Amino acid sequence: MCGIIGITSNKPVSSAIINSLRKLEYRGYDSAGIATIDNGFINEIKSEGRVDNLEKNLVTKSLKGTLGIGHVRWATHGIPNTVNAHPHSSETVSVVHNGIIENSTILKKLLIKKGHKFKSQTDTEVIVHLITEYLKENNLKDTIIKVLKQLHGSFALGIIFKDQSDLIVGARRGSPLAVGYGPNENYLGSDSYALKSMTNKISYLDDGEFCLLKKNNVEFFNENGIKVNKKVLHVSSQEENYEKGDFKHFMAKEIEEQPITIKNCVKEYIDNINNEINIYNIPWKFDNISSVVLIGCGTAYHSCLMAKYWFEELTSLNVSTDIASEFRYRKNRFKEDTLYIFVSQSGETADTYAALDLCNKNKMKTCSIVNVIESSIARDANFVLPIHCGPEVGVASTKAFLGQMLVLYIFILKISSLTNDLDKKNLTNKIKDLKLLPKLVQETLLTEDKIRMSADTFSEAKGSMFLGRGFSYPIALEGALKLKELSYVHAEGYPAGEMKHGPLALIEDGMPVVVLAPRDNYYKKTISNMQEVIARGAKVLLITNKSTDEVVSENIWQTIEVENSNYDLIPFLLTIPLQKLAYYSALKKGYDIDKPRNLAKSVTVE
Ligand code: F6R
């Protein structure tokens, strides 16, 4: 995680750096810092917490200089305090870093032996001392080449030097890094989003490369110092002005706007007149594909799991899912007839990217489903399907989850028509149902009041459980993840049929349990499992869909009915009350809903 910005210009840079840091806060918000070069000196200001705190500090201690670097941190080594905040500086050099230096302990010992004194507990500080050490006997470029070769792990770096008033060094291994070009100024940034307010002309460093960035010229080199040419890409210059409006939190807004984001996405992928799916130019033939592997992390992984159920229902392909951090280190037997699908809102998640990279290196067929279209995962997959849900600011993913599921579902329908697993009539019916989804989501959002009441109980609980079977199981996992990350209440998602194999021992009097039991093929089985937890004292919040049949069970604490639809689409509707449950539980506790503790929106370290 962590966000990096660097600017060299002919005008003062500190306020532009602060503005960019605000855009990068989704990558980390433990602490923030900025360093500039002013008259041959490195000046730095760092603060614990948000960029707002840093800006307050800047008012009291102004930072001059036409060249500077800034950073927002998500702590890996060392607690989130001012000393551990980046930049880390010696008298000669200042460094901002995203990633992890895996051999920092060994390097630190060697440097201490040479007389270097460390101020922080971070892995980053070794880079400062290494550069300082190598500069004693090498020119700047050779120093960079030698230092980068000493570092193990992943990194994106921004480096400035006290006697260089027009030079920022950028370096990348693993973690993404972009260069932006402006009029008489140039920029370094963790991504194009951070640079968008300043330029739409961007180049990306490839793995192992570094750059020497001056205000009128940028040179790129490979790890051995050989010059490389770079394409300048023109990214969308539209700065999405995404505000909270009348909502108290971005998350509340993002939940409420789901009918619109779903409608937009359906419009992108469905030909309204002919009821056909607008996915063309797929670079492979499905005659040659017999297996699909879906890969993601966290919420994105849950959408992969959901897709597995749809794939199995609607196609004859073999399907498996994988958590990216597991996939990337397991022994994988890559086969030509397999399609790998990567799901990521940010498109920058380090583990998901590494899994994609691994598949690309093994010449596999790769497809990504992303929200951020200029991201690394979008750029590097053979085929990209955007989810079109607009920026998601709340750290807990809501509208992107529905967007991921939606695009996966549409893609699966498309595949099932290409493989002839689904006939034209069935396909048309499913597409017609899909077009009703925005309205059904809108109506399900009205379950508000009952959810608010239940949220009070969940927010005070020691622990809770979310149970579902079949299509509802991935949604149970997602509901539990949302509750734990926002309200810090222990929550476990389980397949309802698994309870008697151990977890039932956790049920005690008054424990709140969500049971997802839509009237699908699993309904009766799930209701039996629900009765088993009620018999052991659980307070059950049952979420089902509207039906003329009454639920036959006693002692249910609360029942919420979502709208009705074909079975495939019920998971979208079940998700809505769970998002609200998590939101109101956190609201009740007064927690920071858009930025929960210890988390970040974009997880760019493994
Ligand atoms: C939870 C959440 C995370 C992300 C995960 C992957 O609400 O948002 O679990 O889903 O970190 O992030 P992306 O989708 O950006 O790859």
Image: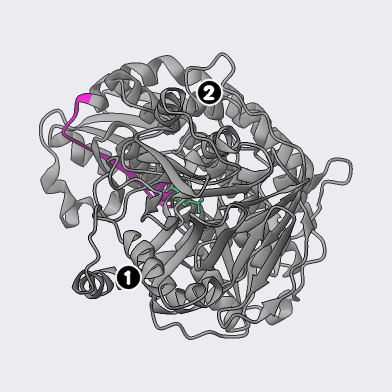
Going by the numbered disc 2, the residue's amino acid type is Leu
- Look at the image and give the residue range highlighted in magenta: 460-475
Question: Against 248, is 127 above or below?
Answer: below
**Per the image, is 462 magenta?**
yes
**Per the image, is 453 magenta?**
no
Question: Against 424, is 365 above or below?
Answer: below
Q: Is residue 104 left or right of residue 602?
A: left
Question: Against 407, is 420 above or below?
Answer: below
Residue 369 vs residue 44, the one in the foreground: 44
Q: Tell me, yes or no, whether the two marked residues, 1 and 2, touch with CB atoms within 8 Å.
A: no
Residue 589 vs residue 128, the one in the foreground: 128
| Quadrant showing the C terminus | bottom left
Residue identifier under label 2? 445
Q: From the Cβ of disc 1, is ligand 1 less than 8 Å away? A: no
Which residue is painted at 70% across and 52% down in the image?
215
Label 1, label 2: how many angstroms apart (C-alpha)? 46 Å
Asked which secondary structure carries label 1, the reply is loop
* Few, some or many residues within 10 Å of mark 1 (<14, 14–19, 20+): few
Residue 328 visible in the picture: no
Residue identifier under label 1? 102
Residue 190 coordinates in the image, percent (x, y): 56, 53
